Image: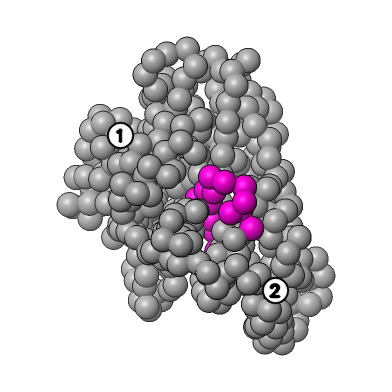
């Protein structure tokens, strides 16, 4: 089955060279878009010799990819943050799913990271695999998808016979989404009229002073430069005619409609909230939603919903239960899908008994 299998351990330095030589982007499938690769090497938290991926090739064809991200975790025991690796994406070509390739690449990733691995969430189909591995669950949370339009894929998934009528479902999706936007615009509270928005591509001192105390207890050590990097628009590439691009990528970052929007929410010239979200086609994925004072929470939720309506997206993703409950209480959603996600840590990290705060913004490298 394998004619000429080789495994490559990709460091930041190797990724830099790959970009210069166009190594991964001259085939049909690339591990990540060039925009994401450029974004990764721009992170000064990653050392040149630290690993960003383990890739399996068979006759120069990529057949397996495991994306790693070196990061710094707040530590109760040490005065300096602890080096950890997020395991973000683990992919094996369908032709090789029933071989040992996936497990081999996974174990190689554990070896090169000295087993200092965190997993924010994983696909349901590999649940039985992780149950047999030396990982502990460090958090369990619900992921919420709020649908504001009738999504054809859900209808077809539940009733396969509807696939015959899928061309009739898309106009229904557009109509229901438009109607829900009209209704939710009516539901916006009057306080939204008093709000002002500053749109930023990098944090200034005002916003950093506001959000720094709200991030100090995060799982991941947050600095101004780190959040600047995390929210940098350079990682997303909007492609007007995607059909004519030579490659498709396993990691999200390129789309016909994709962007990141970062917003200072202000009232009476004073910052009262911080919001950052990704728009990708029909979805709005929330990366940061920070509000210092409870009295401003409803106003900031209204700011989020005003942006959602203006962006003309159809559904919202968040792992923030408080935010979900606030949206669900005030605004109309056609359907809410909830799925429990587990965060894992390898036992070699020795985190049992630690008090860990795991937020939506931790490990959020979408």
Horizontal side of residue 27 vs 294, given as left or right: left
The quarter of the picture where residue 355 lies is top right
Q: Is residue 330 magenta?
A: no
Q: Is residue 286 magenta?
A: yes
Which residue matches tag 2?
A: 187
Query: Up-down: is 200 above or below 6?
Result: below
| Numbered tag placed on residue 45 in the rendering | 1
In this rendering, the label closer to the viewer, 1 or 2: 2
Horizontal side of residue 159 vs 362, given as left or right: right
Residue 229 in percent (x, y) is at 33, 47
Residue at 42% from the left image edge and 13% from the top image edge: 78
| Distance from Cα at disc 1 to Cα at disc 2 | 43 Å
Query: Up-down: is 324 above or below 80?
Result: below
Q: Secondary structure at mark 2?
A: helix
Residue 197 in percent (x, y) is at 43, 66
The answer to which of 186 and 202 lies nearer the viewer is 186
Query: Up-down: is 265 above or below 2?
Result: below
Q: Residues within 10 Å of mark 1 (few under 14, many from 20)?
A: some
Q: Residues within 10 Å of mark 2 (few under 14, many from 20)?
A: some
The quarter of the picture where residue 109 lies is top left
User: What is the magenta range?
Assistant: 283-298
Residue at 34% from the left image edge and 60% from the top image edge: 200
Q: Secondary structure at mark 1?
A: loop
The answer to which of 62 and 69 lies nearer the viewer is 69
Query: Up-down: is 351 above or below 171?
Result: above
Horizontal side of residue 200 vs 366, given as left or right: left
Residue 305 in percent (x, y) is at 60, 67
The numbered mark, 1 or 2, whose residue comes first in the sequence reads 1
């Amino acid at each position: 089955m394998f004619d000429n299998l080789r495994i490559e351990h990709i460091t930041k330095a190797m990724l830099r060279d790959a970009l210069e030589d166009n190594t991964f982007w001259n085939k049909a499938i690339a591990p990540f878009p060039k925009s994401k690769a450029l974004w990764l090497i721009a992170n000064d938290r990653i050392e040149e010799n630290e690993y960003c991926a383990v890739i399996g090739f068979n006759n120069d064809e990529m057949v397996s990819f495991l994306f790693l991200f070196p990061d710094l975790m707040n530590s109760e025991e040490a005065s300096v943050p602890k080096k950890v690796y997020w395991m973000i994406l683990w992919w094996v070509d369908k032709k090789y799913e029933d071989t040992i390739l996936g497990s081999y690449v996974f174990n190689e990733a554990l070896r090169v990271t000295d087993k200092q691995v965190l997993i924010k969430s994983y696909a349901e189909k590999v649940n039985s695999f992780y149950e047999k591995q030396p990982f502990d669950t460090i958090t369990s949370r619900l992921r919420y998808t709020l649908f504001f339009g009738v999504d054809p894929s859900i209808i077809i998934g539940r009733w396969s016979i509807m696939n015959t009528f899928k061309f009739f479902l898309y106009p229904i999706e557009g109509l229901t989404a438009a109607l829900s936007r009209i209704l939710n615009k009516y539901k916006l509270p009057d306080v939204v009229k008093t709000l002002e928005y500053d749109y930023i591509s990098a944090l200034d001192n005002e916003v950093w002073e506001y959000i720094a105390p709200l991030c100090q207890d995060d799982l991941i050590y947050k600095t101004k430069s780190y959040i600047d990097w995390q929210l940098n628009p350079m990682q997303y590439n909007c492609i007007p005619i995607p059909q004519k691009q030579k490659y498709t990528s396993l990691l999200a970052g390129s789309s016909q409609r994709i962007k990141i929007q970062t917003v200072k929410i202000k009232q009476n010239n004073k910052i009262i909230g911080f919001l950052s979200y990704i728009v990708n086609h029909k979805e709005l994925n929330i990366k940061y939603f920070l509000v210092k004072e409870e009295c401003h929470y409803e106003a900031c939720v209204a700011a989020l919903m005003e942006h959602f309506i203006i962006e003309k997206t159809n559904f919202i993703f968040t792992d923030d239960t408080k935010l979900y409950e606030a949206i669900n209480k005030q605004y109309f959603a056609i359907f809410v899908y909830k799925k429990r996600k587990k965060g894992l840590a390898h036992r070699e990290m020795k985190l049992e008994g630690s008090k860990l705060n795991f937020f939506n913004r931790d490990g959020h490298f979408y």
